[in-house]
């Protein structure tokens, strides 16, 4: 008997016309490791919510069909009971972390199971060590990087020891060390007989962990259910998998050291002068010195907790240096308010919930221009333009909180692009996004730079392919210091820089070719045994 049984499942979110799931039929055997692939909005996250019971118990809408997990009818079983059978690592990590201190948060679920204090402590220490975050035990969760939060969320699920584990975009914010650790963890859990379902856009890295089965979704339906990963090759175009990005980045001859045309660097746009920063006495940045000039496209790479997002917040004046000075166009941010700097530095946060607040998407995208002096008659066209490029125009009259995680990310990008800041800082823009979604707004960013509207781009990312595609210069952080600064292609071909920065290799390196090569084998075509080259 399958551990998960789904029969003729339909679901439409309240207030939405289009069904999120349309007649899903799926059985998953105990101990299987299943990859669920699909574009943003295809129904992957909704399917997971139907398995763990958030649908229909927490999300309202039209629900029909049946889901059983280990014999329990999900629609008729309390969430407290289901949570002991199904553990979920959510895509929106901030919604999953409930207590301020790391060890307390990992212990939260265990305490609700009324376990002894000794057993709770034992499991917390075990799972923190298993996720490589014992050193974060006493840290404030709000001070952690996105990748560190991701590991804490996974630890909280593992501590409860459920037989079924669901993971929604678990690789989204992880550095190379985190990805390798998670791949190893998945293999271990599979070896223990757990049932694993992983919804992920970074398909190649999940495949490397040894999946048993691949389920592909499109527009709320299952269009492929196979035990042969080679079948994914036929979906490269339809799913907009990252392989297509490799084709384009290789074909285009770079006109700059990185991988795209750029305007000559001009005056200093952002400058860090011996910048130190600490959270509650714990150093995060240690004497950073750097200059980002107008016209540059800069990637900021490094391990989880290296200080990348902290640097972005310092640029916008949300944080002030513990020591040293941050200057934006020659003006110190120390005595400037965020609203004064927002028309100059536009920051798209890693976590959408740190930005979204308005009743409708239209209000969200309009807010920045309305409050930064843009003429009122110009605002409607800016809103529509940004919404179209970010593929959220159909959501303008809806609440941003009723959207999928991928849609929330794109709404945040649109709300910043509508202000057309001189310096645009994107913090992990590809996390939880399919290739087509993030390419559309990255190309829009390129267009704004070419038109001299946005003058400087800072891209904080773990996606090295994205860095090669859209930046010319790369800064690598490690433990609060800049350890490398140079042309993107050169740095990302240096194994020592990748090792020290805990940066995952580009897909080009993983397939054994130099970054400057003229052609490349597509990974998903290799799975099919094809010898074709692009």
Image: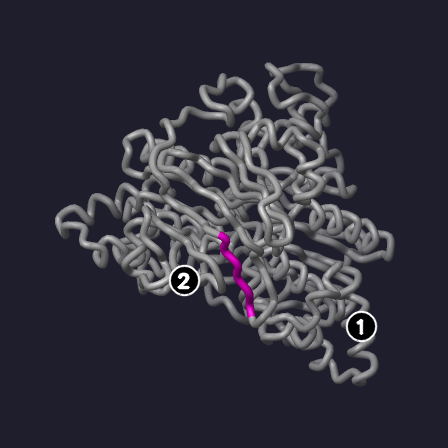
Report the quarter where the C terminus lies. top right
In the picture, measured across the screen, residue 526 lies left or right of residue 40, that is: right
- Which quarter of the rendering shows the N terminus? bottom right
Q: To which residue does mark 2 refer?
A: 318
Residue occupying the point 81% across, 55% down: 189
Q: Is 100 colored magenta in this rendering?
A: no
Q: Measuring 18% from the left and 54% from the top, which residue is drawn there? A: 373
In the drawing, does residue 109 fall left or right of residue 392?
A: right
Q: Please say whether residue 25 is visible from this viewpoint.
A: no
Q: Are marks 2 and 1 in contact (CB under 8 Å)?
A: no
Residue 473 vs 253, above or below: the answer is: below
Q: Is residue 112 above or below residue 29?
A: below
Residue 276 on the magenta segment: yes
Mark 2 element type: loop
**How far apart are labels 2 and 1 at the CA level?**
37 Å
Residue at x-position 61% and y-position 67%: 282
Side of 315 where 516 appears, left or right: right
The crowding category of the residue bearing disc 1, from other C-alpha atoms within 10 Å (few below 14, some 14 to 19, many at least 20), is many
Q: Is residue 347 above or below residue 126?
A: above
Q: Which residues are magenta?
A: 274-279
Identify the element where label 1 is drawn: helix
The circle drawn on residue 106 is: none
User: Disc number at residue 123?
Assistant: 1
């Amino acid at each position: 008997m399958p551990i998960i049984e789904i029969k003729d499942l339909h679901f439409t979110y309240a207030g939405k016309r289009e069904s999120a799931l349309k007649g899903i039929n799926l059985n998953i055997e105990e101990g299987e490791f299943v990859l669920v692939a699909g574009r943003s909005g295809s129904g992957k996250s909704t399917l997971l919510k139907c398995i763990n019971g958030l649908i229909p118990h927490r999300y309202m809408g039209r629900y029909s069909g049946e889901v059983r997990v280990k014999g329990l009818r999900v629609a008729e079983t309390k969430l407290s009971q289901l949570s002991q059978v199904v553990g979920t690592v959510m895509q929106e990590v901030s919604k999953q972390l409930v207590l301020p201190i790391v060890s307390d948060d990992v212990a939260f679920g265990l305490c609700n199971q009324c376990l002894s204090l000794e057993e709770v402590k034992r499991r917390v220490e075990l799972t923190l060590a298993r996720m490589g975050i014992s050193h974060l035990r006493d840290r404030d969760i709000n001070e952690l990087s996105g990748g560190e939060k991701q590991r804490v969320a996974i630890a909280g699920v593992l501590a409860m020891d459920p037989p079924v584990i669901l993971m929604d975009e678990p690789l989204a914010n992880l550095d190379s060390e985190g990805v390798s650790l998670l791949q190893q963890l998945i293999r271990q859990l599979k070896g223990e007989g757990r049932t694993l379902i992983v919804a992920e856009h970074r398909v190649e890295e999940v495949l490397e962990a040894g999946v048993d089965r691949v389920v592909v979704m499109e527009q709320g339906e299952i269009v492929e259910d196979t035990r042969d990963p080679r079948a994914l090759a036929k979906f490269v175009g339809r799913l907009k998998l990252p392989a297509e990005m490799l084709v384009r980045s290789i074909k285009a001859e770079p006109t700059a050291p990185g991988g795209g045309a750029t305007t000559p660097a001009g005056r200093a746009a952002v400058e860090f002068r011996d910048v130190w920063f600490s959270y509650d006495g714990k150093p995060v940045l240690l004497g950073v010195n750097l200059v980002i000039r107008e016209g540059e496209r800069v990637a900021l790479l490094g391990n989880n907790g290296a200080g990348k997002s902290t640097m972005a917040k310092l640029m916008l004046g949300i944080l002030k240096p513990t020591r040293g000075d941050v200057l934006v166009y020659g003006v110190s941010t120390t005595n400037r308010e965020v609203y004064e700097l927002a028309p100059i530095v536009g920051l798209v946060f890693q976590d959408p919930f740190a930005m979204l607040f308005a009743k409708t998407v239209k209000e969200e995208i309009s807010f920045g221009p309305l409050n930064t002096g843009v003429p009122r008659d110009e605002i409607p066209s800016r809103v529509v333009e940004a919404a179209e490029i970010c593929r959220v125009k159909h959501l303008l009259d809806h609440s941003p909180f009723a959207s999928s995680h991928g849609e929330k990310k794109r709404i945040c990008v649109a709300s910043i692009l509508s202000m057309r800041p001189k310096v645009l800082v994107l913090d992990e823009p590809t996390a939880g996004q399919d290739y087509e979604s993030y390419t559309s707004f990255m190309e829009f960013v390129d267009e704004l730079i070419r038109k001299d509207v946005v003058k400087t781009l800072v891209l904080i990312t773990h996606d090295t392919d994205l860095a090669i595609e859209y930046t010319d210069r790369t800064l690598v952080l490690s433990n609060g210091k800049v350890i490398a600064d140079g042309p993107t292609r050169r740095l990302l071909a240096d194994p020592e820089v990748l090792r020290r920065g805990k940066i995952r290799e580009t897909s080009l390196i993983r397939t054994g070719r130099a970054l400057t090569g003229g052609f490349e084998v597509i990974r998903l075509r290799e799975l099919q045994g094809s010898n074709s080259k692009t």
